[in-house]
Amino acid sequence: MSFFRTLSVRAREDELSEALKHLRRLNKIFAAPGPTRAGVEKLWKAIGSPTTLTLLDVGAGSGDVNQKLLRWADQKGVKLEITLVDLTEEACEEARNLFRNEPRINVRRADVRELPDASADIVTGSQFVHHFEGKQLVEMVSHMLRASKYGVVINDIHRHPVSYAAVWVTTRMISRNRYIRHDGPLSVAKGFTGRDWQDLKQQLNHDTLTYEWKPLFRYSVVIPQQGTLS
């Protein structure tokens, strides 16, 4: 990436669109898609490894973590359909451009709190729920559960000094975008520890919630619907 650009014409690139592009680079560097794929496969096996599967990715941004899921589906012989949901039109447009040649991906501007019950087999959220805390966090995850038939998969950041330092340095190496430089480290500071997931498990009253630490400094959280595993 060049740190200098021509100034002969005015810049037209939208700052949020630019931030999403740089976020995709960060996701590759820190292996962000892995925890989502691991969680989806775990829940998929728990429901009997069906040959068709629908996913709803909320707060999806440009939805790039789903590229790994599409490859996984090809390997497993699963007919997979994914709906990417985000509140902002800018993110939805970025997602449409990224997946313009992928018929298995549908993009929709919407709020998960307004989606119908059981909108998809599995609802996923990648680097999404750390935007909420306390009662709001419980309510948001509850809405994700309500919108799913079989359960929820959450992929989010481990709050740790090493991950904070790594993201702080990397964002300054790869980007001049003010959102990335500010929100990247802030996302780590808003991230989770194992105790946080235990607290959420208690507040949701979901004994089946499980979480696993995954490289690089992420958690893969699986919350099956009550009765899914029985």
Image (spheres, helix red, strand yellow):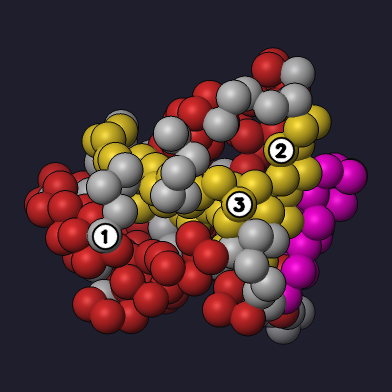
Q: Is residue 115 left or right of residue 170?
A: right
Q: Secondary structure at mark 1?
A: loop
Residue 31 x/y as whole percent: 43, 36
Mark on residue 205?
Answer: 1
The disc labelled 3 sits on which kind of residue? Answer: Lys
Is 41 included in the stretch rendered in magenta?
no
Q: Is residue 142 left or right of residue 6?
A: left
Q: Is 115 located above or below residue 98 in the figure?
A: below
**Label 2 sits on residue:** 53
Measured Cα–Cα span from mark 3 to mark 2: 11 Å
Mark on residue 39?
Answer: none
How many residues crowd mark 3 within 10 Å: few (<14), some (14–19), many (20+)? some
Residue 28 x/y as whole percent: 49, 39
- Residue at 77% in and 44% down: 81
Residue 119 x/y as whole percent: 69, 61
The disc labelled 2 sits on which kind of residue? Answer: Leu
**Label 3 sits on residue:** 149
Q: Is residue 54 left or right of residue 61?
A: right
The disc labelled 1 sits on which kind of residue? Answer: Asn
Is 97 included in the stretch rendered in magenta?
yes
Measured Cα–Cα span from mark 3 to mark 1: 18 Å
Q: Is 5 located above or below residue 101 in the figure?
A: below
Q: Which residues are magenta?
A: 93-109
- Residue at 63% in and 81% down: 114
Q: Is 126 located above or below residue 181 in the figure?
A: above
Measured Cα–Cα span from mark 1 to mark 2: 26 Å
Mark toward the start of the polypeptide (3 vs 1): 3
